[in-house]
């Protein structure tokens, strides 16, 4: 399966060789990371760059925990919709929204893979991927008081899980500015739209790719232009264009950079 979520047409042997290279790169990172040392790796970037999958695979292969911060904003959005607070969002009065989200005590169940997000101790995994949540989430993510609350939670998670790959939009810029390894994944909006379309088609949905592209561009616009924690490439992040790479290729690129940054010679 490539980054677009479609079956790769590469011959089996080529895939085997490629995958083993990724595993070897990840193994080398694992071997240069002292299992006692804290290490935070941030991965930011827009939707459709394969960020979540890449972050999760990188974390698994080098033995770190994985934090999906988008799930936190999605959970907040599901709560707003399901508690009838959308009018407060439209009128710009955020007090009750924040109160409800604080009350939900959002946190992750670290026993599941990937960690499930819980609100009032109930898992919200399926709910947060529904289209109504996806449509509204970038608006919810503009609420500054909510962002402060989320960043505070993310830093607490960083203390509790100091060996972490965390992905989102502001992880390298705001939540963990001192992280030793930062990545920014990007790809042309049309490439990102066609990846999302392929994923949705695989899941049995009928897709209008032009509409999907418009939605992605609109989400990019809102995410990049908000006052707090806008989507941006941190000045000290490594920027990777994932347009021509499949998931394994991206994980390999990240693992290779991580080896360099950790400052140990590669012995593989
Ligand atoms: O990565 P995702 O599609 O699950 O993110 C959902 C939304 O949450 C996206 O529109 C941007 C927002 N988000 C954010 O503002 N800050 C983060 N750290 C993570 C996600």
Image (cartoon, grey):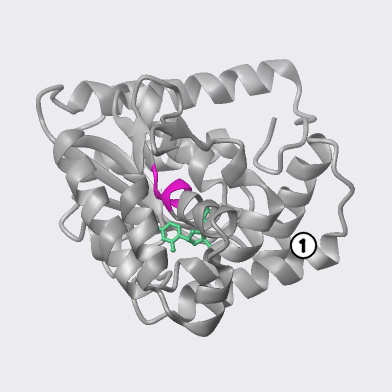
Quadrant of the rendered structure where residue 199 is? top right
Residue that label 1 marks: 212
Q: Is residue 252 visible?
A: no
Q: Position of residue 160 (x, y in %)?
A: 16, 35
Q: Is residue 70 magenta?
A: yes
What range is drawn magenta here?
68-72
Q: Position of residue 236 (x, y in %)?
A: 26, 64
Which residue ends up furthest to the left in the rendered image?
Answer: 36
Q: Does 206 sit left or right of 74 as displayed?
A: right
Residue 77 drawn above or below residue 112: below
Q: Position of residue 228 (x, y in %)?
A: 34, 76
Q: Main secondary structure of the magenta part?
A: helix
Quadrant of the rendered structure where residue 267 is? top left
Residue 90 drawn above or below residue 11: below
The N terminus sits in image quarter = top right
Front residue of 196/153: it is: 153
Front residue of 80/32: it is: 80
The C terminus sits in image quarter = top left
Q: Does 137 sit left or right of 150 as displayed?
A: right
The residue positioned 77% from the left and 62% from the top of the image is 212
The residue positioned 61% from the left and 53% from the top of the image is 48
């Amino acid at each position: 399966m490539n980054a677009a979520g479609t079956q790769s047409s590469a011959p089996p042997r080529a895939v085997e060789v490629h995958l083993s290279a990724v595993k070897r790169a990840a193994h080398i990172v694992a071997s240069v990371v002292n299992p006692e040392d804290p290490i935070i790796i941030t991965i930011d970037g827009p939707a459709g760059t394969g960020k979540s999958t890449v972050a999760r695979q990188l974390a698994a292969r080098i033995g770190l925990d994985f934090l999906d911060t988008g799930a936190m904003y999605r959970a907040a959005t599901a709560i707003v919709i399901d508690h009838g607070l959308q009018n407060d969002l439209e009128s710009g009065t955020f007090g009750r929204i924040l109160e409800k989200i604080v009350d939900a005590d959002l946190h992750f169940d670290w026993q599941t893979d990937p960690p499930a997000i819980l609100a009032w101790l109930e898992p919200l995994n399926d709910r947060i991927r529904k289209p109504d949540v996806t449509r509204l989430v970038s608006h919810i993510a503009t609420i500054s008081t909510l962002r402060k609350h989320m960043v505070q939670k993310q830093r607490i998670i960083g203390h509790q899980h100091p060996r972490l790959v965390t992905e989102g939009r502001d992880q390298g810029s705001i939540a963990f500015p001192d992280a030793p390894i930062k990545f920014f994944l990007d790809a042309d909006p049309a490439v990102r739209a066609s990846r999302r379309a392929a994923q949705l088609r695989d899941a049995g949905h009928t897709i209008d790719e032009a509409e999907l592209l418009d939605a992605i561009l609109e989400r990019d616009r809102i995410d990049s232009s908000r006052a707090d924690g806008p989507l941006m490439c941190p000045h000290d992040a490594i920027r990777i264009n994932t347009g021509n790479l499949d998931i394994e290729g991206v994980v390999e690129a990240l693992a290779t950079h991580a080896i360099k940054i950790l400052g140990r010679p590669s012995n593989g």
